[in-house]
Image: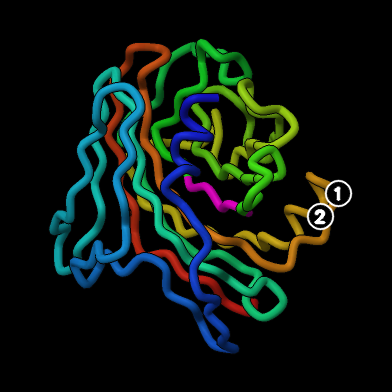
């Protein structure tokens, strides 16, 4: 519970972005971290803009630590329901049981958050993770908040580490399929590389994040 609700404490409602074109959330390739807020839970994951070849990315290094970066942004899922991003992990986290509180660690994950407002238990989050042990495509309840937070292994146990992968997820469709609700907007996006429960180490990198119509 500590990771989820503590991170949400820094993600409040903001002015809606109304656009029919792509909505950019993270412009790491331009060296931009404006609007991203750090929230530490147990130690501090190190996030920084780093150069890789001719571009810039957000790198993350975690040693028995958990902290995230969150951005307040309202996305209209009726116009731009698809989240696009790229990521890479350099190692997996061993034999953790990711469906338990003791194993709630991920080399890379991206949250999308629906703010519950004055009723915090109405807050919902979809966690797109690079799982160390679950097969790609597996979905499960978060160990701390099974009703409010769901985990989906976009990459999993069969995927190799060390290479960049581009992803597209229809967030509105995922919320409807997994939560059974037609969510028409989200209120925040967060990134986390965390290793505090299993006392492990992980390095990862994240490319630009944006929402599109398709």
Q: Secondary structure at mark 1?
A: loop
Q: In the visual, does 49 lie left or right of 147?
A: left
Q: CA distance from mark 1 to mark 2?
A: 5 Å
Question: Badge 2 local density, few (<14 within 10 Å), some, or many (20+)?
Answer: few
Front one among 168 and 99 = 99
Point 62% across, 68% down: residue = 82
Placement of the C terminus among the 4 image quadrants: bottom right
Count of residue discs: 2
Q: In the visual, does 73 lie left or right of 29?
A: right
Point 52% across, 47% down: residue = 111
Front one among 80 and 206 = 80
Placement of the N terminus among the 4 image quadrants: top right
Highlighted range, magenta: 110-114
Point 35% across, 27% down: residue = 41
How has the structure been colored for display?
Answer: rainbow
Residue 156, position in %: x, y? 55, 34
- Residue 180: which disc? 1
Residue 51, position in %: x, y? 13, 58
The residue at which mark 2 appears reads as: 176
**CB under 8 Å between callouts 1 and 2?**
yes
Instruction: Report the magenta stretch's main SS.
Output: strand
User: Quarter-wise, where is residue 186 in the image?
Assistant: bottom right
As drawn, which residue projects farthest toward the right? 180
As drawn, which residue projects farthest toward the front? 118
As drawn, which residue projects farthest toward the bottom? 20
């Amino acid at each position: 519970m500590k990771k989820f609700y503590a991170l949400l404490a820094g993600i409040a409602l903001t002015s809606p972005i109304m656009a029919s074109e792509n909505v950019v959330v993270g412009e790491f390739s331009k060296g931009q971290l404006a609007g991203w807020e750090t929230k530490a839970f147990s130690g501090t994951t190190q996030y920084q803009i780093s150069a890789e070849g001719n571009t810039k990315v957000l790198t993350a290094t975690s040693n028995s630590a958990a902290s995230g970066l969150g951005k307040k942004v309202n996305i209209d899922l009726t116009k731009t329901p698809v989240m696009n991003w790229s990521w890479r992990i350099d190692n997996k986290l061993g034999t953790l049981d990711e469906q338990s509180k003791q194993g709630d660690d991920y080399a890379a994950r991206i949250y999308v958050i629906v703010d519950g407002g004055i009723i915090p238990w109405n807050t919902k989050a979809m966690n797109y993770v690079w799982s160390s042990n679950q097969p790609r495509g597996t979905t499960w309840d978060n160990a701390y908040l099974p009703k409010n937070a769901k985990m989906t292994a976009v990459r999993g146990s069969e995927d190799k580490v060390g290479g960049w992968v581009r992803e597209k997820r229809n967030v509105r469709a995922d919320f409807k399929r997994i939560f059974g609700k037609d969510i028409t907007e989200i209120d925040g996006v967060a990134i986390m590389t965390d290793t505090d429960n299993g006392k492990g180490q992980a390095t990862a990198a994240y490319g630009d994040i944006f929402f599109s119509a398709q």
